[in-house]
Image: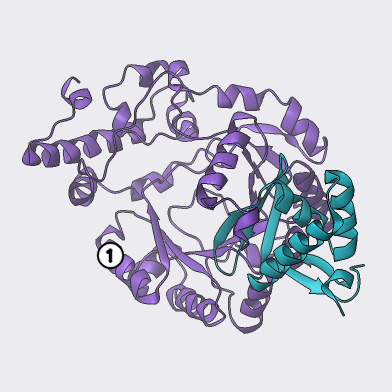
Chain colours: A purple, B cyan
């Protein structure tokens, strides 16, 4: 690209603009759950998903989705992630995605890949998504299918990955790590490496939004977590964040929003604090007038009284929504994040002590 | 047909938004992010498929009160680079 007209360090420029949109509460990214219907029944899923063929009259129509995209574009949004449920169960997914592309959005798809073959893969490629993120829970059918509760799903998901790669579509494998699959972490990583694609993992397992805590039994045990973190949490790999009063654990409410299949606008998927519904208000008003944005962007360390004095805060990857769902107080301690932080600090300290390096801030606690 | 008569518009891989006068572009095929400066952003903003290159040049000459010949050279060079990098495509007819 002509250097005369571009900044030399474009990634820095992107980060600068991203930061600016956060501080000015300007829309940048959108996460959109288009349906809660799904063709898998994953044991850990936080959604109360419905059968693939369920009649769901409340889902946004194609036209409502397009109108919302127009409003999102007016607000300045740049990226949209289409998620589910399983998005390819919506027959209008490609019409919606192409419309978003036409309106200048970069598009990302989240899918389990079960329906991605031949013609569907061609249609995905035609959208030119930035990436297709595919949930893969293991490197064997035995592990993957036990989690999805759909025999044969591993083969279909692997087929999807290869089919998309054949079409030069960028694919990412993502794996929530649980009791049942953490032993295959290295294999998952190796699989992604062999395929030349990105791998991402997450250990966050949260209750269903109905309040059902069944998914929590799939969380890794303390010992599994310690064994996992021990080689990965060292003074070299874990940068202790500087936490002043304005420190934020996440960017909730700042430059992004989430949309439910029924038009509810949330600050984020984790917290699901509703700002309004696009069927009863226009998006501009929801984005500028709902008080929830200010309430959530105020969630700095200063306004989290428990975290502000917690000795584990530099090791904590806290989700305000999980604190609310699981422990009943968005401003209080997240017991699951606390557990992880405690074990992460243990792993860190073991490594730091071994190397003779104990950062002052940790040593003081 | 000269580039001046063609109609620039975003390449199918390009997603873009103008934020405070800066065009931020995401190129999905190559997974690249580019940010254009003020003039580049304005050219991209005008590259809707409905303005010809000549229209874009006229607009910039007016907005920047600049020299027509110099702006023509700059804009055509810039668009050629954008085409080479699959950021922009040039059509013979205006987009509907």
Q: Residue at x 86, y 45 (%)?
A: B65
Where does residue A339 sit, x and y in percent of width and height? 28, 35
Instruction: Tell me the quarter of the picture where residue A241 sits.
Output: top left
Where does residue A105 sit, x and y in percent of width and height? 70, 55
Front residue of A50/A342: it is A342
Where does residue A301 sit, x and y in percent of width and height? 43, 21
A273 above or below A214? above
Q: Residue at x 69, y 55 (%)?
A: B16
Determine the secondary structure under disc 1. helix
Front residue of A338/B91: it is B91
Front residue of A86/A76: it is A76
Instruction: Tell me the quarter of the picture where residue A353 sits.
Output: top left
Q: Residue at x 61, y 32 (%)?
A: A273
User: Is residue A96 among what the camera can see?
Assistant: no
Q: Kindly identify which chain the residue marked by label 1 belongs to.
A: A
In this rendering, the count of numbered labels is 1
Mark 1 surroundings within 10 Å by alpha-carbon count, few (fewer than 14), some (14 through 19), many (20 or more): some
Where does residue A57 sit, x and y in percent of width and height? 78, 54
A66 above or below A91? above
Instruction: Tell me the quarter of the picture where residue A286 sits.
Output: top right
Horizontal side of A216 relative to A233 (left or right) equals right
Front residue of B3/A316: it is B3
Q: Which residue is mark 1?
A: A184
Q: In the rendered view of the protein, which quadrant contains the N terminus of chain A?
A: bottom right
User: Is residue A32 among what the camera can see?
Assistant: yes
Q: Residue at x 55, y 65 (%)?
A: A132
């Amino acid at each position: 690209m002509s250097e005369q007209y571009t900044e030399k360090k474009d990634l820095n420029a992107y980060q600068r603009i991203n930061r600016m949109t956060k501080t000015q509460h300007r829309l940048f990214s959108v996460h959109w759950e288009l349906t809660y219907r799904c063709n898998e029944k994953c044991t850990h899923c936080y959604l109360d998903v419905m059968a693939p063929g369920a009649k769901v009259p409340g889902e946004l129509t194609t036209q409502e989705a397009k109108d919302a995209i127009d409003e999102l574009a007016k607000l300045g949004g740049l990226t949209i992630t289409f998620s589910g449920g399983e998005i390819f169960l919506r027959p209008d997914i490609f019409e919606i995605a192409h419309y978003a592309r036409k309106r200048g959005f970069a598009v990302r798809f989240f899918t389990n890949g079960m329906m991605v073959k031949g013609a569907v893969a061609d249609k995905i490629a035609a959208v030119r998504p930035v990436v297709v993120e595919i949930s893969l829970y293991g490197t064997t059918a035995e592990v993957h299918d036990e989690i999805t509760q759909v025999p044969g799903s591993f083969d279909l998901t692997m087929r999807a990955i290869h089919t998309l790669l054949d079409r030069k579509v960028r694919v990412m494998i993502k794996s929530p790590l649980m009791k049942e699959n953490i032993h295959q972490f290295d294999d998952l990583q190796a699989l992604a490496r062999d395929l030349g694609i990105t791998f991402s993992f997450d250990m966050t397992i949260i209750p269903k939004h109905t309040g059902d805590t069944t998914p929590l039994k799939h969380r890794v045990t303390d010992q599994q977590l310690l064994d996992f973190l021990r080689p990965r949490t060292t003074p070299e790999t874990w940068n202790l964040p500087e936490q002043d009063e304005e420190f934020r654990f996440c960017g909730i409410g700042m430059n992004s929003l989430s949309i439910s299949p029924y038009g509810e606008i949330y600050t984020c998927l984790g917290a699901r604090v509703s700002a309004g519904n696009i069927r009863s208000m226009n998006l501009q008003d929801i984005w500028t007038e709902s008080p929830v944005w200010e309430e959530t962007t105020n969630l700095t360390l200063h306004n989290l009284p428990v975290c502000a004095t917690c000795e584990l805060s530099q090791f904590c990857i806290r989700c305000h929504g999980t604190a609310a769902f699981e422990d009943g107080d968005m401003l209080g301690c997240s017991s699951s994040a606390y557990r992880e932080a405690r074990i992460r600090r243990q792993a860190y300290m073991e490594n730091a002590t071994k190397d003779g390096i104990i950062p002052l801030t940790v040593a003081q606690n | 047909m000269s580039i001046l008569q063609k109609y620039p518009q975003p390449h199918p891989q390009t997603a873009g938004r103008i934020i405070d006068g800066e065009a931020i572009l995401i190129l999905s095929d190559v997974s690249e992010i580019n940010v254009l400066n003020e003039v580049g952003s304005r050219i991209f903003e005008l590259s809707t498929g409905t303005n010809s290159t000549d229209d874009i040049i006229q607009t910039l000459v007016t907005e920047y009160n600049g020299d027509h010949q110099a702006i023509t050279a700059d804009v055509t060079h810039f668009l050629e680079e954008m085409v080479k990098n699959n950021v922009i495509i040039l059509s013979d007819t205006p987009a509907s």
